[in-house]
Image (cartoon, coloured by chain):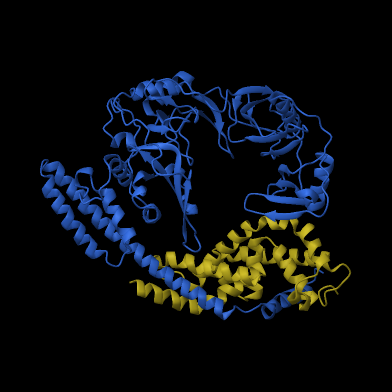
Chain colours: A yellow, B blue
Amino acid sequence: MSDDLAKQISEIYEAYYNDIYYFLVYFTDKQEDAEDLTQEVFSRLLKALPQYDGRVAMRTWLFSIAKHVAIDHYRKMKWQRLFSDNWLIRIMTKEGLPEPELEMKEEMRLIKEALQKLKPQLRIVVILRYIEEYSVKETAEILSIPETKVRVDCHRALQTLRKLLGQSIEGGIINGIAR
Amino acid sequence: MGLPDEEDQLISKLRQIKQEAKPPRPEWKQIGKERLIRQARTVRWKRRITHVSAYVGTIGAAALMGIWLSSGQVAEQANLSESQASSAQEKSEFLPAALYQEPELGKLPPSVVPTEQPAVSKEAAAGAESARRNVPTDQAEPVANVDSEPQTTTRAERIMTPLEKRAQHFLQEKLGEESNYYEIDPGHSRETEGYIAFRKLVHGIPLQQHSAAVEVNPHTGKMSLLLYPIEENGVGTTASSEQSSVIDKTKAAQELASGLRLVYAGKDRPVLQYMSDPQLVIDAKTGKRLANSQGEKRVAPIKTEGKRLIITDADKAEDVMKREFGIPVSGKAFMTIDEKAISFIWQMSDKREARLKTADDGSFVGYSLDGSFELGGKPLSSLQQAQDAALVRLAKYLPSDVEEVLVEKALQERGQATFTFVPLYQGVPVVDYPYFVAVDMDSGTVTAIQGDFSRGSFALPSQDNAISLDEAKEQFVKKAPLELVYLNSQSDPVLVYQVRLDSRKPWAIDALTGKTTE
C-alpha cells in the first residue's frame, strides 16, 4: 500500500510540479519561496491522498491546495508589507538592487510589483486567468467560486492594477500602457 | 488608461510574466521528490504503528479482563502477557524498538509489569513504575488518607504519543537508569513545537523545579536533552519517604480555596474566571499555607492617559526613542522580525544597546536598554520610589479606563528593581495583560518596559452575573486537581499539596457558569 502511495505521489509530483511551482512563483515573485511552498502543497496532498476519490480533477485539487498554501503564506508575510512602502524599499534603493532585478525590464518589474500589491484573492484570479490563461470556467472550478465572481474579480483586479501602475509610472515610463 | 485596448495591453503584458519567471531548479525538484517519497513511507509506518498499537491495546484490554475475571492468577496472566508481547514483537519487527516497547509497558497494569527489571532500589522502582505508567503519583503510591475523598483529582491513565515515546527513549539513552526517576509532564510539554517535558520523581512523587526536557528539531529530527538544574545524582534523597501522615485532600483543598480570586483571563476576549493562586501550596503534614516568595500583592492607583504609539519605520522608531522616552540613540537601527514582534536595535559605543519593540501592526510593545545611559536621573533609595517611577512611565500608555494596577511582582536585586503590574478593571485583575517595568536604582531610569499597549480601553464583561466566591470555593473543593509534590526548599524537600500545574490550560472556574475549565 505504501509503495503504491509513494509511486502515486511521485507520479503526481512529476506531472504537476511545474504547474504548481509557476503558479506560486507568480504569486510570491520569489523562486525560493515558490519552491518551498510547492513542496508544502505536495506534502499536504500526500496527507489527503488516501481519501482522494477522483470526483475532482487532480489538477483542480492541487490548485485549490496551492491557493490555501499561498494565502497562508501571504498571512505569514503580512508584516513585511508594513515596511514595504518605506523603510525596506529605501534600503533597497540606497544600496542597490540584486543583479537579476537590474537586468529585468523596468516595465515588467513594475507590473510584477503591482501584481504583488494586489490582495491575495485578486492576485490568484489574475494569475490563473491571465498568466496561466485558464478559462473563466476552469478558474471558477479551481477556486470553487461562480463564474460571475471570476469575471467581477478579474475586472476589479485589472482596474486596481491599472491604478497601481498609473501611480508607479509617474509620467509614462511603461511602454504601451502609459501612453 | 481605462480604455478597452489599454486593458488588452495590460493583459498582454501580464502574459509576458510567464516568459520572465525563473524555471524550477531541477536539483531542488529532485530533493523535494525524494523527501515526499520518504514522507509517504512514514505514512505507512504510522499506519502500521496504529494497527499494532490497536492490536496490543486489544490484547492489553483482554489481559485486564482476564485479571478481573480470575483474580489470584497473576502468574498465568504474566505468562499470557509475555506470549502476547512476543507475538506483538514479531509483528513489530519493522518498527524501531523505542517506538514499540513503551506503549505496551504503558498499558500493562501494575500486576503484570514484567519482573525482569534492572536491579534498582525500592524507591527507584517506585519512581520507574510511576514514570512508565505516567499516572498521578499520589494515586500510584499507597499513601494513607490521600484518596479518602471522592474528588476528581486524578488524571486518567494516558497513552504516550509517538513523540513522547521517542523523547522517553532518548532520555533513557542519555541518563540510563537515572531516567527511571523522571515522568512525562504533559502540562509543560509543547508537543507541536517538539518539546517534551519531564519531571523528577522522589519516592515516586514529583520534585518541583527539577525537570528535564527533550527537544526534537522539527526539521532535522535531531534531539537534545535539557536538564534543570544540572546536579549530581542523589538530589532529593533527604526527602522523607514517610507519607502516611499527610493531611486529607479535602482539608488541603479547603485551605487552597482561600487563594481563589476573580480575574479576567484570556487575551483576545477576556472572560471572568475564579483562579487559584499558582504560588500557593499547602504543607501536606501541617496543613498550613507556605509563604509566598513573591510577597503580598498590592493595589496601586494610577492616572492613565491611554496614549497610543504607532511605529512604522526606523525613522519613526528613532524619533520615538528620542522624543517620547528621552533616550539618545544614534546610528541606523538594525531591524529584526520574528513571529511575534518587530525590533529596532541600536548598537552604540561602550557596548550600549537600545531596543524598541512593536507588534506587527506597528503598535508599541516596549523598549529595553542595555549598558549605561546617562539620562540625568536621581538615585533611588527604596523599592517604593522605583515603583513610583515605573508607574509614571506606565501611566502614559495604559488604557485610559484603568485606574488601578495590581503589583504582581516587585523585586530588587543587583541595582535594579523589576515589577510586573496587572491592570484592574473595576477592581478585577486582567491577568493576561501583564506589564513589565525595570528601573535602574542608581539613575532612576526606566531601563525596560513591555506590555500590550495597543488597546485604548478595556471593554470587558460585567461582573454582575458572576457566581459568589463561596460558590466558587465549593466547586474548588469538589473538583480541583490537587497533587502531592515535593517542594525543593533550601533545606530538605517539603511534601506539599498544590493545584496541578498545566502551562497550557491553567485550572479555573468559569465565573458565569460555575463550570471548571477542564
Q: How many marks?
A: 0
Report the quarter where the C terminus of chain B lies. Answer: top left
Residue beneath the point at 39% across and 36% down: B236
Which of these two is toward me, B56 or B487? B487
Q: Relative to B61, say whether A42 is above or below.
A: below
Q: Relative to A111, say whether B507 is above or below.
A: above
User: What is the quadrant of residue A115 in the picture?
Assistant: bottom right
Residue B403 visible in rendering: no
Position of residue B75 measured from the top left corner of the image (x, y, whole percent): 12, 47
Left or right, B511 with respect to B379, comes to left
Position of residue B442 measured from the top left corner of the image (x, y, whole percent): 76, 32
Residue B469 visible in rendering: yes
Left or right, A72 with respect to B277, comes to right
Position of residue B481 measured from the top left corner of the image (x, y, whole percent): 39, 32
Q: Relative to B315, say whether B19 is above or below.
A: below
Position of residue B426 measured from the top left corner of the image (x, y, whole percent): 63, 23
Left or right, B193 with respect to B373, comes to left
Which of these two is toward me, A5 or B216? B216
Q: Relative to B451, say whether B25 is above or below.
A: below
Which of these two is toward me, A140 or B492? B492
Report the quarter where the N terminus of chain B lies. Answer: bottom right
Residue beneath the point at 48% across and 42% down: B504
Outermost residue on the top side: it is: B470
